[in-house]
Each structure stands twice: as C-alpha cells, then as structure tokens.
Image: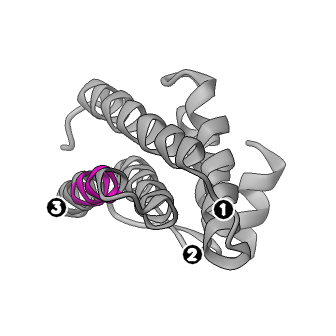
Amino acid sequence: MDSRFRQCLEEKRLVKIEIQMDLVGKEIKAAEYDLASAEKSLKEGNPKWATVQAYYSMFHTAKALVYRKGYREKSHACLSIALRALYENVMDAKHFERFRDCMNLRQDADYGMIYSDKSAETVATWAREFLEAARGALKKQPPIA
C-alpha cells in the first residue's frame, strides 16, 4: 500500500465505507452537471468560472471512483492520492496527473485570480476525458454482492 494512501487513512482524511452505488451515481450526475456548466461558461467568455466548474466535474468524477472502491475522502489531496492508488492499474496515469494539475489551476483561479481562456479550455477538455475514462473504469468493476 502506498505510504501516502496509508497516511491519509491514519489521519482519517480517507475513510473506509460500505460501497453505495447510489453515491457513485450521484457523483457522476454532479460531474456531468459541472462539466456542462463549465462548457456553458466557456461559451459565455467566463474562463475563471469555467476552470472552477471543470475542476469540480473532475472532483465529483474522482469521488465516484473512490466511492466505488469503498472509500470516502475528506480532503482534495487525499482524493488525488486515493484515485491513483486505487486505479493505477485500471486507468491511464495521465488522468491522475491531470486531476492534480487541474486542482492547482482551480486554486490559482479561485484564490490567485490567475486563469486564461486556454487553461479553462484545457481543464474542460481534460474533465470530459476523465469522465469518459471513469465511466469505462466503473463498468469494469465487479458487481456488488
């Protein structure tokens, strides 16, 4: 087990839960909603808000994946760590790196007022690709007994 993953568990920033498929479904719906909102914000010329919304699409997608493995996060950083640890043999590593990068872009946009049309478009593209990859990964999971 990855030492950072173990540390998140020890610090209770990642907790084991019973798998609840309704939570997985709710998170995917939230991810779809946020992605659609981000794309609308892009069209309306609002790159800051598009960046934030696209990141939250990725956040909800990651939560769905982690819920499906029976964990719940209590920090964005531990969500990123859990995502990689739980899906490193299932999903392309670029998705984990992009999630981390988009977390930083969202923080820059939200707190530093640093954003651009190009970065917002990139985050939205990556959010869409991540959601599609997550759907594929979720389909591959064994049924719940």
Q: Earlier in the sequence, mark 2 or mark 3?
A: 3
Query: Quadrant of the image for the N terminus?
Result: top right
Give the class, few, some or many, for how many residues have Cα within 10 Å of label 3's Cα (few <14, many ≥20): few
- C-alpha span from label 1 to label 2: 7 Å
Q: Which residue is mark 2?
A: 74
Q: Which residue is mark 3?
A: 22
Give the label on residue 78, or none. 1
Q: From the viewer's perspective, is 36 left or right of 112? A: left
Q: In the image, residue 130 lies at what x, y percent?
A: 42, 35
Which amino acid type is marked by label 1?
Cys
Q: From the viewer's perspective, is 81 left or right of 144? A: right
Magenta-drawn stretch contains 48: no
Question: Quadrant of the rendered structure where residue 145 is?
Answer: top left
Give the class, few, some or many, for how many residues have Cα within 10 Å of label 1's Cα (few <14, many ≥20): many
16 vs 69: above or below = below
Please name the residue shown 24% across and 63% down the image: 23
Q: Which residues are magenta?
A: 33-41
Q: Earlier in the sequence, mark 3 or mark 1?
A: 3
Which amino acid type is marked by label 3?
Asp
36 vs 138: above or below = below
Please name the residue shown 35% across and 53% down the image: 64
Foreground pick, 18 / 44? 44
Mark 1: secondary structure: helix
Question: Quadrant of the rendered structure where residue 50 is?
Answer: bottom left
- C-alpha span from label 2 to label 3: 19 Å
Q: From the viewer's perspective, is 61 left or right of 52? A: left
Give the class, few, some or many, for how many residues have Cα within 10 Å of label 2's Cα (few <14, many ≥20): few
